[in-house]
Image (spheres, rainbow, N blue to C red):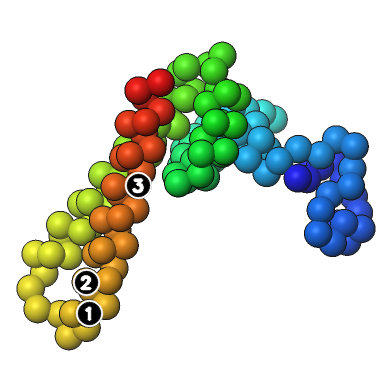
């Protein structure tokens, strides 16, 4: 929990004590829905919106509480939820494409490391796809 208006960063060592505190997931959602509202730079706003969508999606993977929070918060804005899910599908596709590209590179001196990274990418992509499918099925 944090309060972005707080000016005493060292007062709360472990947990925010401010009256206006909200979860980091909530603050991330707020940033995603209204990225840099005062910015006139479309590129910056688009960049923040895209990356915040991926971050929102990643906090939902393998965390039912965060998933429920995000889905409930975006219940009134199906377009925003769809944008987050689409960003996550694209992110999973990039992981899979990187995996396929590495598989076609031939022998690697550190084959064990390459295999471990491949397994991690595959697990991440599967976890993302599972979360997206579960949320879309609601």
Please provide percent x and percent y for residue 129: 31, 40
Residue ID for mark 2 = 115
Q: Nearer the viewer, mark 2 or mark 3?
A: 3
Label 2 Cα crowd, 10 Å radius (few <14 / some 14-19 / many 20+): some
Q: Which mark is residue 112?
A: 1
Q: Are marks 1 and 2 in contact (CB under 8 Å)?
A: yes
Q: Which residue occupies the extreme top position in the image?
A: 76
Please provide percent x and percent y for residue 72: 57, 23
Please provide percent x and percent y for residue 12: 87, 56
Of the pair 116 and 88, the residue shown nearer to us = 116
State the separation of the CA atoms marked 2 and 3: 18 Å
In the displayed structure, 93 sits above or below 81; it is below
State the separation of the CA atoms marked 1 and 3: 23 Å
Residue at point 84% right, 49% down? Answer: 16
Q: Which mark is residue 127?
A: 3
Q: Are marks 1 and 3 in contact (CB under 8 Å)?
A: no
Residue at point 26% right, 63% down? Answer: 119
Q: Secondary structure at mark 2?
A: helix
In the displayed structure, 50 sits above or below 104; it is above
Please provide percent x and percent y for residue 99: 20, 59
Of the pair 19 and 44, the residue shown nearer to us = 19
Label 3 Cα crowd, 10 Å radius (few <14 / some 14-19 / many 20+): some
Q: Which mark is residue 25?
A: none
Q: Secondary structure at mark 3?
A: helix
Q: Quadrant of the N terminus?
A: top right
Of the pair 72 and 100, the residue shown nearer to us = 72
């Amino acid at each position: 929990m944090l309060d972005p208006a707080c000016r005493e960063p060292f007062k709360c060592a472990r947990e925010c004590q401010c009256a206006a505190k909200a979860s980091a997931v909530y603050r991330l959602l707020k940033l995603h829905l209204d990225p840099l509202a005062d910015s006139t730079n479309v590129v910056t706003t688009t960049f923040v919106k895209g990356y915040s969508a991926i971050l929102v999606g990643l906090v939902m993977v393998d965390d039912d509480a965060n998933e429920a929070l995000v889905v409930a918060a975006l219940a009134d804005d199906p377009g925003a939820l769809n944008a987050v899910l689409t960003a996550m599908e694209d992110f999973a596709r990039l992981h899979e494409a990187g995996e396929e590209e590495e598989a076609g590179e031939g022998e690697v001196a550190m084959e064990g490391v390459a295999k471990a990274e491949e397994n991690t990418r595959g697990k991440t992509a599967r976890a993302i796809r599972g979360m997206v499918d579960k949320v879309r099925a609601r």
